[in-house]
Image: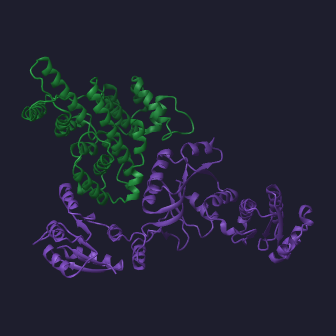
Chain colours: A green, B purple
C-alpha cells in the first residue's frame, strides 16, 4: 500500500485521480456492485411476503450448507434457545422468524465482501468488520433501551453503515494491480492516503449496493449519511447508528483517523437527541466486551 | 443559593427554563440576546448560564467566546435546536459543560442543571419535590392491578418504582398474583411483550415475571431486552408445572428462578422470601431472635411460618458464628394456632443442636399451652420473658 519517498505532489495527484476514477465509474454506471448471492437473493425475496412459505425458504437455504449451518447454530444459541434443540432448517426458520433469518442472510453475504485474497486489504477489512459489528451491537442494544424501532433493523444498519469501504478497497487493489502490470507507475498510496480515498468515496458505492440488495430504507439512510443526525426523526434507527458509531470510535474500535472534536460533539448531541443518560449508554455498550474478545 | 442566567431570544423558552430553575430552588435571571447576557454577567456572578445558539445582536457562540476571552469560566449549558456537529464541536472547544437539543424534556433540563452545578444526588429539597411532581406515576391502565397510592418515585425522582411486573398475555395471571401478594407490594401488569418493554422504559421494577409461552414472542430475546432496560431487576420465568425442565430453560436464558402457575401460597411465599425484605419478620439482637407477629390473611399463615423458619435458622447460624453458646428465641407474638408453632420450635431446636448452641424459648401463655399438646415440645422449658430466659442462662 505504501511507497516511501514519493513526492507529495505526485501523491495528492494520485489520490485525486483515484477518486475521479471511482466517481466516473459510478456516474457511468460502470461500477461492478456485488450482487447478493443467488441463494440469499431468492430467500430475501421470499421473506418479503409476510405469508412466506417456510418450506420454500427452507429448501432454498438447504442448498447453501454454510448458511444452513449458521442458521441452525443461531436458532440453537442461548439468545434463541428453546426447550428442545432445533435440528431442521424449517424448525430454525420458524424459531427465528423472518426478520432474523433475513438479517442472518444479509450479514453472511456482507461478511463475504470483507474478505480479500490480498493480505493487506484482508487485514484492514478485518478491523473494519470488527468496527461494523461493534456499531451493530451497540445500536441494537441502544434501540432496545430507547424503544426507537426494531433492534434487528438497527443491528443491520450498524453492520452495513460502512459497507462501501471494502468495495472501494477492492477497486483500489484492482487499479494498483493494473498499473503494476502496465509498469506505468511505481508510486502508490501510503496507508493514510489509501484510507482517505476510501473515506471520501465509500458512501457513493455503499448506497447503490444497498439499493441492489433491496435493504430496508432505514438501513439505506444510514449508509447514505452517518455523519449528521436527523432532527426530524429523533429516536430513529439511523440516528442510533450514528450515535453508536461515534461511541465505538471513542472506544478506539475504528480503522483510520478520527476527528476527535467532531466525534465528541456527535456523542454530546446524540445523548440529548436520543434522551440517554450515562447509565443507559453504559448498558448499551456492555456488548462491546464480547466484540473485542472475538476480534482478538 | 445558586444563581442561573438563561439567555434566549424566545420568551417562551426563557419562561420554561425559569420555571424549572425556580422549582429546583435556585434563583434565575433572564436575557434575550448575547449583548444583554454579557452585560448581566458583568454585574452578577452566575453559577450557570443556559445559552441559546441563534440569537439577534450577539449569538450564543459570540457571547461564549467573549465571556471566555475575559477569563470568565462560568459553566455554560447550551440549549439549542442546532445539531450540526461542526458547530457543537466549536462550542465544546469554547468549554461548554453540556448540551440540550430543543425541543427538550423538563427532566433532562433539571438533570443537566444539577449535573452542571455538581449537585447530582444532593438536590435541594425543592428539587426533589419538583422532580417527583414532574414525573407522576402514569395512570394505571386496564391491565394494571396496583394497590391504592401504589407507585413510588425512585431515588432520582425520575421514574416511578414498582415492586413487581408481570408480563403475561393472560389477564387473570396478574389478578391472581395480586391476591397472593401483600398489600404493600406494588404490581404492574403487561399483556404483551411490547407493553412490557414500554413499561420498563418508563419505570423501575424490582422483580419481573415473564410468561414462558406468549404467542409470537421469543422469550429469550425478550429477556435480553429486559436485562438491558432493567439491569437491577430480578427476572423470573412464569411457567406451567407440566412444562419440561422449566428450571433448566430459565437457567439457559440467565433467569433467576421459576414461579409456577397456577400460583400456590407456598410458591408465592418462596418467591417473596427470595426477593422481598423479610428481615422484619425475624430481628436479631446479639443472641436474641425476636419473631414478629403475623399480619395478613389466614391463607398466608403457612407461608409466614415457612419464612420464619428459614430466616430464624439463618439467624441461628449467625449467632453460632459470633461464638454465642446460647440463643434466645422470642416467639411470644406468633399466632398460637394449629401445629405450626410446635413444628417451628422443633425445627429450630434441631438446627440449634446442629450448629452447637443451646436454645431458650420465650413464649406467651397461649404458645406454652399449645406446645404442651405435642410430645416433642411438652417437656420444653418456655420462659415468659426474655429477662427470665437470660436469668436461666446465667
* Residue B290 spot, x, y in % from top left: 74, 71
User: Position of A107 compared to B384: left or right?
Assistant: left
Instruction: Tell me what residue is drawn at x 81 percent, y 61 percent.
Output: B357
Instruction: Tell me what residue is drawn at x 69 percent, y 68 percent.
Output: B281
Q: Nearer the viewer, residue A268 or B108?
A: A268
Residue, far front: A5
Q: Against B273, is A245 above or below?
A: above
Q: Is residue A46 visible?
A: no
* Residue B59 spot, x, y in % from top left: 14, 68
Instruction: Tell me what residue is drawn at x 35 percent, y 53 percent.
Output: A148
Name the image quarter holding the N terminus of chain A.
top left
* Residue A116 spot, x, y in % from top left: 28, 26
Name the image quarter holding the C terminus of chain A.
top left
Q: Against A37, is A148 above or below?
A: below
User: Position of A245 compared to B218: left or right?
Assistant: left
Q: Nearer the viewer, residue A118 or B279?
A: A118
User: Position of B330 compared to B274: left or right?
Assistant: right
Q: Against A241, is B7 above or below?
A: below
Q: Total marks drawn?
A: 0
Q: Which quarter of the figure has residue B7?
A: bottom left
Q: Is residue B70 visible?
A: yes
Q: Which quarter of the figure has residue A28?
A: top left
* Residue A149 spot, x, y in % from top left: 35, 51
Amino acid at each position: 500500500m505504501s511507497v516511501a519517498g514519493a513526492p507529495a505532489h505526485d501523491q495528492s495527484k494520485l489520490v485525486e485521480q483515484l477518486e475521479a476514477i471511482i466517481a466516473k465509474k459510478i456516474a457511468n454506471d460502470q461500477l461492478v456492485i456485488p450482487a447478493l448471492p443467488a441463494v440469499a437473493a431468492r430467500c430475501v425475496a421470499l421473506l418479503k411476503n409476510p405469508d412466506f412459505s417456510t418450506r420454500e425458504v427452507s429448501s432454498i437455504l438447504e442448498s447453501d450448507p454454510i448458511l444452513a449451518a449458521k442458521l441452525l447454530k443461531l436458532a440453537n444459541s442461548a439468545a434463541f434457545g428453546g426447550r428442545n434443540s432445533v435440528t431442521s432448517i424449517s424448525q430454525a426458520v420458524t424459531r427465528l422468524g423472518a426478520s432474523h433469518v433475513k438479517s442472518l442472510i444479509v450479514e453472511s453475504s456482507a461478511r463475504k465482501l470483507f474478505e480479500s485474497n490480498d493480505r493487506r486489504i484482508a487485514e484492514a477489512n478485518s478491523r473494519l468488520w470488527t468496527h461494523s459489528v461493534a456499531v451493530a451491537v451497540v445500536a441494537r442494544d441502544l434501540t432496545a433501551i430507547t424503544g426507537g424501532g426494531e433492534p434487528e433493523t438497527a443491528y443491520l444498519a450498524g453492520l452495513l453503515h460502512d459497507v462501501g469501504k471494502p468495495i472501494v478497497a477492492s477497486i483500489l487493489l484492482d487499479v494498483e494491480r493494473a498499473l503494476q502490470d502496465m509498469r506505468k507507475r511505481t508510486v502508490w498510496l501510503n496507508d493514510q492516503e489509501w484510507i482517505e480515498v476510501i473515506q471520501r468515496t465509500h458512501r457513493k458505492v455503499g448506497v447503490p449496493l444497498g439499493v441492489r440488495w433491496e435493504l430496508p430504507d432505514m438501513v439505506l439512510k444510514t449508509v447514505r449519511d452517518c455523519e449528521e443526525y436527523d432532527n426530524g426523526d429523533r429516536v430513529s434507527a439511523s440516528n442510533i447508528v450514528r450515535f453508536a458509531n461515534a461511541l465505538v470510535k471513542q472506544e478506539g474500535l475504528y480503522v483510520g483517523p478520527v476527528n476527535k472534536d467532531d466525534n465528541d460533539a456527535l456523542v454530546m448531541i446524540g445523548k440529548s437527541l436520543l434522551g440517554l443518560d450515562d447509565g443507559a449508554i453504559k448498558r448499551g455498550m456492555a456488548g462491546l466486551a464480547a466484540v473485542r474478545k472475538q476480534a482478538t | 443559593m445558586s444563581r442561573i442566567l438563561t439567555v434566549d431570544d424566545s420568551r417562551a423558552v426563557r419562561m420554561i427554563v425559569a420555571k424549572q430553575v425556580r422549582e429546583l430552588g435556585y434563583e434565575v435571571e433572564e436575557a434575550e440576546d448575547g449583548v444583554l447576557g454579557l452585560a448581566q454577567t458583568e454585574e452578577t456572578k452566575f453559577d450557570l448560564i443556559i445559552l441559546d445558539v441563534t440569537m439577534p445582536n450577539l449569538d450564543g457562540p459570540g457571547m461564549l467566546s467573549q465571556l471566555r476571552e475575559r477569563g470568565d469560566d462560568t459553566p455554560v449549558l447550551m440549549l439549542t435546536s442546532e445539531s450540526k456537529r461542526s458547530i457543537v464541536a466549536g462550542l465544546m472547544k469554547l468549554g461548554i459543560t453540556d448540551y440540550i437539543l430543543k425541543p427538550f424534556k423538563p427532566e433532562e433540563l433539571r438533570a443537566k442543571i444539577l449535573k452542571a452545578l455538581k449537585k447530582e444526588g444532593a438536590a435541594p429539597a425543592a428539587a426533589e419535590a419538583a422532580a417527583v411532581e414532574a414525573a407522576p406515576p402514569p395512570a394505571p391502565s386496564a391491565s394494571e392491578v396496583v394497590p391504592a397510592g401504589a407507585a413510588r418515585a425512585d431515588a432520582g425522582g425520575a421514574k416511578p418504582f414498582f415492586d413487581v411486573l408481570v408480563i403475561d398475555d393472560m389477564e387473570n395471571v396478574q389478578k391472581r398474583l395480586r391476591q397472593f401478594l401483600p398489600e404493600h407490594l406494588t404490581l404492574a401488569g403487561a399483556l404483551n411483550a411490547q407493553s412490557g418493554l414500554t413499561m420498563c422504559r418508563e419505570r423501575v421494577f424490582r422483580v419481573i415475571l415473564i410468561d414462558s409461552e406468549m404467542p409470537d414472542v421469543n422469550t429469550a430475546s425478550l429477556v435480553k431486552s429486559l436485562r438491558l432496560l432493567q439491569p437491577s431487576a430480578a427476572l423470573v420465568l412464569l411457567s406451567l408445572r407440566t412444562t419440561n425442565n422449566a428450571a433448566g430453560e430459565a437457567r439457559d436464558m440467565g433467569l433467576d428462578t421459576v414461579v409456577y402457575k397456577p400460583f400456590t401460597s407456598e410458591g408465592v411465599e418462596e418467591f417473596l422470601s427470595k426477593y422481598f425484605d423479610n428481615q422484619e419478620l425475624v430481628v436479631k439482637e446479639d443472641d436474641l431472635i425476636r419473631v414478629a407477629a403475623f399480619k395478613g390473611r389466614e391463607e398466608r399463615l403457612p407461608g409466614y411460618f415457612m419464612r420464619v423458619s428459614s430466616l430464624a435458622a439463618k439467624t441461628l447460624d449467625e449467632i453460632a458464628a459470633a461464638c454465642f453458646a446460647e440463643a434466645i428465641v422470642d416467639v411470644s407474638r406468633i399466632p398460637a394456632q394449629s401445629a405450626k408453632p410446635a413444628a417451628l420450635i422443633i425445627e429450630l431446636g434441631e438446627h440449634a443442636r446442629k450448629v452447637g448452641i443451646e436454645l431458650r424459648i420465650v413464649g406467651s401463655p397461649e404458645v406454652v399451652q399449645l406446645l404442651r399438646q405435642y410430645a416433642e415440645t411438652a417437656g420444653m422449658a418456655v420462659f415468659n420473658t426474655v429477662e427470665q430466659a437470660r436469668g436461666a442462662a446465667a
